[in-house]
Amino acid sequence: MTVGIQLFEIVDGKTRQKSFSPMVWRSKLALNHKNVTYETVPVTFLDIPVLIPKVCPNVTAPTVPTLKIADGEGLQDSLAIAEYIERNYPKGPSIFGQTASEKNLQLFFDSYVSTRLHPAIQRLVYIEMYEHQDAENAAYFKSSREKGGKTLEQLGGDQAQNLKELKDNLGLIHSALLRSGGWITGEQPGWADFTLISAFIWFNSFAPQKFEEGILNAIDDQVLRNYWRKAQELIQ
Ligand SMILES: N[C@@H](CCC(=O)N[C@@H](CS)C(=O)NCC(=O)O)C(=O)O
C-alpha cells in the first residue's frame, strides 16, 4: 500500500480529537489552500519524542507539525512545510504571494502574530491545556512548563492584563482588516491569514469564552467576528 503525504498533528490527550496547535494549523491551512491530498497522524505530547524521530531521524528537538513526504523523508517546522508546498505545488493560489517583498511582508505579519498574540493567548490557556490532557500527558505538560520554577497558575499571570494586552495588540490587525475588507492578504487568504486564523483556532479550542471576550468582542464592531466567520470556510 502506498502511503502518501502524512502530517503529524498534536491532539489533546483526553479525547484525542482536538487538533489545537497553532503551528500545525498553519501547515494544514497551507496544505488545504494548495489542495494537497494528505492524511493526518494524531499524536499526543508524549508521542512526539517517540514518533517524530522515526520520520526525521536527525532532529534534536522533535516537534509538530512534521510532514512525512516520502519513506524516510520528513520535514519539520510549519514555515519549512509551507515553503516546501509552495515550491512543489506551483499550481493554484500562492501561499506567500507573487514577489519576494510580498512574502517578506507576510513573514513580518507572522512575526507580529507570534510575538504579540501568542504569548498572551498562551498565558490565557495554560490551565485549560493542562485540563484537556489525560493523566500522563497532563503530568508531562505540567512538569515541562513548570521547570523554570513557576506553577501553571503563576505562568498564566493576571488574566485581565492578558486580555488587555491582546486587545491592544489586535488594534493594528483590526485596522488592516478594515482596509482590506477581506483577508489580510486581500481577496485570497495567504500565509499572514493562516498565522492569524491558527492563533484563533488554538485559543478557541481550549477557552471559547475567553476567545469570545478576548478576540471577538475586543473591539466594538463586527470586523473580527466577520473575519472569524469567514475563516470557517478554510477550517476542515
Ligand atoms: N518553529 C516550530 C515550532 C513547533 C512547535 O513548537 N510545536 C509544538 C506544538 S505547537 C510542539 O511540538 N511541542 C512539543 C512539546 O511541547 O513537547 C514550527 O513552526 O513548526
Image (cartoon, rainbow, N blue to C red):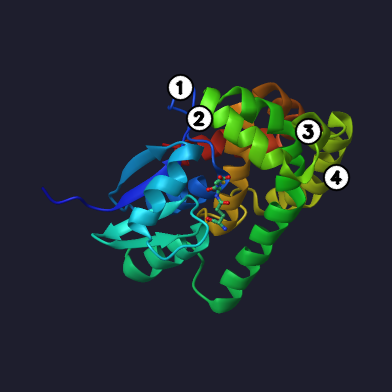
Horizontal side of residue 41 vs 130, given as left or right: left
Residue under numbered circle 2: 12
Q: Earlier in the sequence, mark 2 or mark 3?
A: 2
Residue 71's place in the image compared with 22, above or below, is below
Residue under numbered circle 1: 15
Label 2 – label 3 distance at C-alpha? 21 Å
Taking the spot 57% from the left edge, 45% from the top edge, the residue there is 22
Label 1 – label 3 distance at C-alpha? 25 Å
State the mark number for residue 161.
none
| SS for dot 4 | helix
Q: Position of residue 155 (x, y in %)?
A: 79, 37
Residue under numbered circle 4: 168
Label 3 – label 4 distance at C-alpha? 26 Å
Q: Say which amino acid is labelled 1.
A: Thr
| SS for dot 1 | loop
Going by the picture, which residue comes out furthest to the bottom?
100
Look at the numbered disc 4 and say if its residue's Cβ is closer than 8 Å to ligand 1.
Answer: no
Q: Say which amino acid is labelled 4.
A: Asp
Q: Position of residue 227 (x, y in %)?
A: 62, 39
Going by the picture, which residue comes out furthest to the left?
1
Residue under numbered circle 3: 151
Q: Position of residue 124 (x, y in %)?
A: 75, 33
| SS for dot 3 | loop
- Asked if residue 219 shows in the view, the reply is no
